[in-house]
Amino acid sequence: MTRRIVTNMALSLDGRYHGPAGPEDMAWVMPHAVSDISRDHLTRLWESATTALLGRVNAEGFLGYWPTVADMPDADERDRGYATWLVEADKVVLSTTLTEAPWERTRIVNAPTTEVADELKEQDGGDIVVFSSASVIRALLQADQVDRLALTIFPKVLGGGPTLFPDGLPAGDWTLVSDDHGEDGTVALVYDRAR
């Protein structure tokens, strides 16, 4: 079975992945990211994955925080599960500036996203998942390499900031695999690329 490239991004209702103040403008995410719908959605994505593909900025944020959650006794069990998975999974970090990996089971690669994705798909393993690395997801969408597109839509209009889907992406059909919604208005969607 061929490995799938699975991408996941949290978006506002107006399609933004961070607010107009820049990448640090993420406070709007937290009330919804800790909801049951968001945690269950994330869990379903990492359970079938063995590799995380990350951009440098996202890797530094994720790997600076999540490994500490694995040992927090009061953390939600789904968060501890994700943290443990992230520590144990193979991690490939795309970077032009990092020279060595400060994390276990991590390889730093200075190569185009599409080439790295092709290389990973040729290897044995489970899904290759990209969590919240917008530049990586956009490059994969542009090259039509995304097999599964997962989105979590939070009930907030940001009124500015970058969007995940710029003009010029290749046209294509997607099949809805699952749609869930939470009491807080969060919607979790999963689509497979129809090829």
Image (cartoon, rainbow, N blue to C red):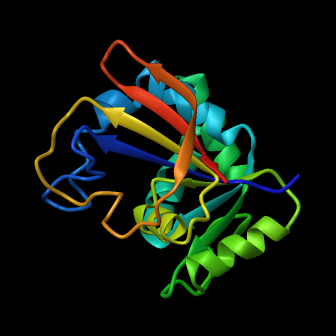
Q: Position of residue 88 (x, y in %)?
A: 74, 51
Height in image: 192 above or below 104?
A: above
Height in image: 154 above or below 15?
A: above
Tally the marks: 0
Q: Is residue 107 visible?
A: no
Residue at left 85%, top 67%?
123
In this rendering, would 182 be left or right of 109? left
Q: Position of residue 134 (x, y in %)?
A: 41, 61
Out of 174 and 54, give the one closest to the viewer.
174
Out of 162 and 147, give the one closest to the viewer.
147
Residue at left 83%, top 56%?
2
Out of 9 and 175, give the one closest to the viewer.
175
Can you name the residue that lies furthest to the top here? Answer: 183
In this rendering, would 98 be left or right of 124? left
Picture quadrant where residue 177 is located: top right
In this rendering, would 19 be left or right of 57? left
Q: Position of residue 178 (x, y in %)?
A: 57, 27
Residue at left 60%, top 24%?
77
Residue at left 57%, top 65%?
144
Quadrant including the C terminus: bottom right
Q: Is residue 127 visible?
A: yes
In this rendering, would 47 be left or right of 99? right
Out of 18 and 74, give the one closest to the viewer.
18
Q: Position of residue 59 (x, y in %)?
A: 51, 63
